[in-house]
Image (cartoon, rainbow, N blue to C red):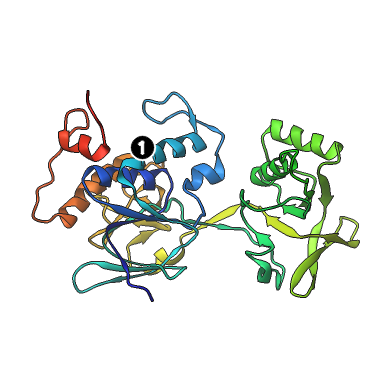
Amino acid sequence: MDKPIETDALIIGAGPVGLFQAFELGLLGIHSHIVDALPYAGGQCIELYPDKPIYDIPGTIATTGRQLVASLLEQLKPFKPQFHLNQQVNTLEKQADGRFLVTTSTKTTFLTKTIFIAAGVGAFQPKKLAIAGLDAFAGTQLFYHLDVEADYAGKQVTIVGSEETAVETAIQLANLPSSVESPKLTLLHRRDVFKAAPDKLETMRHLIAAGKLQLRIGQIAGFDEHDSQLKALQVTDVDGKTAQLPVDTLLVLQGLSPKLGPVADWGLDIERKQLKVDTEKFQTSEAGIFAVGDINTYPGKKKLILCGFHEAALASFAAAAIVFPDTPTLLQYTTTSTQLHQRLGVTHP
């Protein structure tokens, strides 16, 4: 195992509250690393409502999940946190010096003074197909997220799912630039019922009518392979008839399910799958481990993004006392503080 990455703060979760946590830590001079199970930042905002309006972000009349995440990432740039995506934190061990040794699913290890659990309702895991042996093709022909850099030109691409992500992906791949050979697209679901915005559904139906997208109603009963390559899916229709569906790339976009995962095994006080915290520091039952956002619970808790932002601010000040034990943490204002301006890279004429 490689030498652990030493850091003052490790943030578990790259949703809006996790991103703002990194910003608040940065203001106090604390550098952070961020781990998330998804391959990109954004958490629930990107997965569940990327283009739906949000009206209760202070000072912002309306935004979307996608826009909010983009703004938070832009705000965070001066502090240059390091992201470790597409991996889940598995183990946590307290060390003799008070720090925590953390290991992820990709064997990345951290030695950190403080931990901030901002995992929302849990780590999002893709809903997989219950087809024995199919996962052998994961990462080569079977994918649970669209890779925008992958080459789909001219390939037999099957998208499984009925959620908005599946519909949007079908539309996106059907509208590749004219200079690119169009993939042979199939959208597969067990029923002709899809959950997406009306305009997206209308576009999907137009693509089907134009022959740019094939709609296949049925369920995967098995698959065919040759020379360790996935060649076709065995699809059973509503009449019980099974036929082959040739496939080069299989995108399974059936949505995500949140799981508390290994956090439940770390010995922290838990109430109804949420971490109990105080309302002064938003610290868990283990000193140095904080929980912010939807993952925590306390009297009067409200699951709102703006509440998570408040929790992140107070948790940062509590962490500063651990990271800088011999230096009092003063309350400074970004409006007037020269030190904060320096950290933010603000220049004045």
Q: Nearer the viewer, residue 143 or 227?
A: 227
Tell me, yes or no, if residue 133 can be seen here: yes
Query: Which of the 4 quarters of the picture holds residue 338?
Result: top left
Residue 255 in the figure: left or right of residue 22: right
The quadrant of the rendering that contains the C terminus is: top left
Which secondary structure lies at badge 1?
helix
Image coordinates of residue 200 in percent, x first then y, are 70, 35
Please name the residue shown 68% across and 45% down the image: 169
According to the picture, the residue beneath numbered tag 1 turns out to be 75
User: Which residue type does callout 1 highlight?
Assistant: Gln
Residue at (56%, 55%) from the top-left corner?
257
- Quarter of the figure with the N terminus: bottom left
* Residue lying at the far front of the rendered structure: 179
Q: On screen, 335 above or below 163?
A: above
| 139 lies left or right of 237 | left
Is any atom of residue 304 visible in this view? no
Give the residue at x 55% y 46%: 47
Percent coordinates x, y for residue 239 in the rendering? 91, 57
Q: Nearer the viewer, residue 209 or 337?
A: 337
